[in-house]
Amino acid sequence: MTSLAQPVARQPVIEHMHTVAGQIGRHVQFMEVCGTHTMSAFRCGLHGLLPKNVTLLSGPGCPVCVTAQGDIDLMIDLAQRPGVTMCTYGDMMRVPGSRGSLEAARSAGADVRVIYSALDAVRIAEENGDHHPVVLAAIGFETTAPTAAAAVLRAHQQGLDNFSLLACLKLVVPAMTSVLTLRGRSRRGVEGFLCPGHVSAIIGSEAFRPVADEYGVPCVVGGFEPTLMSQAVVALLEQVRDGRHDLENLYPEVVTPAGNRIAQRWIDEVFEPVVTRWRGLGTIPESGLAIRKAYSGYDARRVFELHPVVAPEPDGCRCGEVIAGLVRPDQCRLFGERCNPTRPIGPCMVSGEGTCQAWFKYGRANAPKPSCQSVTPPETDGP
Amino acid sequence: MILSRYQPETGPPPPPAPTLPDGPGEVASGSAAPTAEAPRVASDDSVVMAHGGGGQLTDQLIHQHILPRLGNPTLSLLGDSAVLPPSFNDRVALTIDSYVVQPWRFPGGDVGRIAVCGTVNDLSVTGATPRGIALGIVVSEGFSLRDLDRVLASVAGAAAEADVDVVAGDTKVVDYHDPPEIMLTTAGVGYRPFSYRPMLDRVHPGDKLLINGPVGDHGLAVMLARELPEMQVALRSDAAPLNHLIARCLSRTHEGVVFMRDATRGGLAGVTADIAQSTGLHVVLDESAIPIRPAARHAADLLGLDPLEIANEGKLVMIARPAAVDTLLMEMDGYGGDPWERPRVIGEITDIRDGLCELITTLGGRRILQKPYGEELPRIC
């Protein structure tokens, strides 16, 4: 090993990225909309390797982060009802609601279980017996929706009366177009999307066609390995350079044009698209999934007669603007000092895939001195 | 009850020890929820409160279960304290750690194995030769005696590997049954030659960081056994005593060995961030040189965790003088076949004084490595 204190030679893909960016000769801004892309980019130091005139924003891709405050409050309230077992995924536990979190509710005696698969919740319902309602708080995008649907179908098949699902599921494409509309009003728009690899495997790459064709924004489906992500950025740059707005799939080993039809059929069987509220993006038509009437016996909102709540976000928290790519995490006055992974205030600091946590762990807050030529934070336009 | 208070003449002569079906570390899979269904009454096959009461059942526990597996001239005296031989010019090293792991048995080991390895390694990385281990067992009423035998056999197996005796012990039985059902505490004492000084104040810019094998296996094997037991993953805990390896290195060049730490909780990131912070120097790691098995990488991806932050139980991070690196790599490379097990140089200490640890990624990017924040929560999708 030669001395690590010296600058490292650029890999060919990064070299090529710089060449293409140079040919464009102006600032361009892309957005990824997947929590795994967010983490992968920070873990491999991609932001520091991007050409000076290229910014990669993190959009609404972290399931925990986009969940509206009102939905989080609903989960906590429901968990606190006597006899209710609330099942949720691990990173939901610490998200602060208006009053406490699921973790706090659990330590105060509520029965909250961390699960890894939606079907675990059905199994718990089977074991619990008829008199103990089990609720699955289903959050996430098209990646978690099929297993949530499978859970409802399984419960239906087994005639379980004590299982229900609190659907807070969201769809990626409406969020992307909403970002374009939102950002249209700001100084600089998003000129390309790095489309999420996992979601695309379910919905198929063709689902992004309207974004490319109707909104005229380049879309590239990319994988998660550092090189694959870099290649996707290069493809976006080439489209901008050539004045194209195409849909490209650079992850064909996992993503097909039509996606996973079985998973799509499950989603369609159980859920229907509805208007839903997002943190940071507001209410977007046809952007959420609600349980169809045929399965309303498994809809926690009906079973427990829950009414949609609009709750204020934590005081001073700018997670919403961070999700929309309108501000950098360090532009939030809570960032670092008052809101950090040990004591998170907003969801983007709770989740391992949240932009704020990624910034705190890998980004500017702890960036080395300039002598180490490192981790340049993404440049965005200011608030 | 205190093991050493036992009076030999009060009990019946101990029957021959039952032969153990399982050797240490011979557990095929961590998937079984070990003893959740064990009956809580039958003292024939499970632990009862009276096993900790200091009476005849306690004697039985000692003579039928503990001494046959852990017995040695010092322990078998059953004195109030173990008395160890003197070592005149050496310094005495003392350490203690408690081991709580759920499930208590996992691919590649169990709580008994890590209890011995952890304490042996804590002594060894300070340059001390382990001389004796004291073992405290806290076990739930209803824990099966067969499983207790397995844990004891694991303790014995790991102690034999490390060539160190369990010289004192204590057992308590508690009546709460929530996991973990068995907890071990091991204290270790060792002697360190006066001239050995593997300490952080000897770290200089230019020194290299070495590691003796792949990281992340232990924590991920345990986590998968706990959270996704239905998954079949070819990952085994790396729990192993490091004292022989360290002794070989120190005997070749104790001047060349600047500092050592075993990368347990907090993983490699925790150790290197600590080194940077404590020395105030800038530490650079080369991601492409850090060995991570593909199975560990995939398991970490699945759980949304960073393999560099995952606990190990048999990984040594060594800071060495550049001139000693080749010798030390040769001494560490004693384990043959598996290319992942080869020791490697993974980084170096630079002369920048900012107390940060930086990782050069496989893509050529750079990022800061920090200590993890505590419990890592597996992610959603």
Image (cartoon, coloured by chain):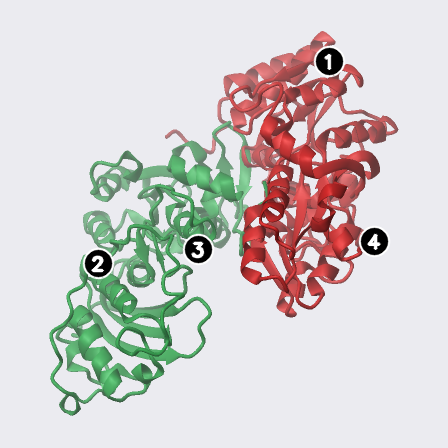
Q: Which chain is green?
A: B
Chain name for mark 3: B
- Which amino acid type is marked by label 2? Asp
Residue that mark 4 sits on: A307
What is the crowding at mark 1: few (fewer than 14 residues within 10 Å), some, or many (at least 20)? many
- Left or right side of A56 for B7: left
Chain name for mark 4: A
Q: Residue A86 or B82: which is nearer the viewer?
A: A86
- Which amino acid type is marked by label 3? Arg
Nearer-N-terminus badge (2/3) = 2
- Left or right side of B206 for A296: right
Mark 4–mark 2 contact, CB under 8 Å?
no
Residue that mark 2 sits on: B22
A235 to B298, vertically: above or below: above
Mark 3–mark 1 contact, CB under 8 Å?
no
Which residue shows up at 24% across the image and 44% down it? B332
Q: Colour of chain A?
A: red
Residue that mark 3 sits on: B265
- Left or right side of B292 for B305: right
Residue A245: mark in rendering = 1
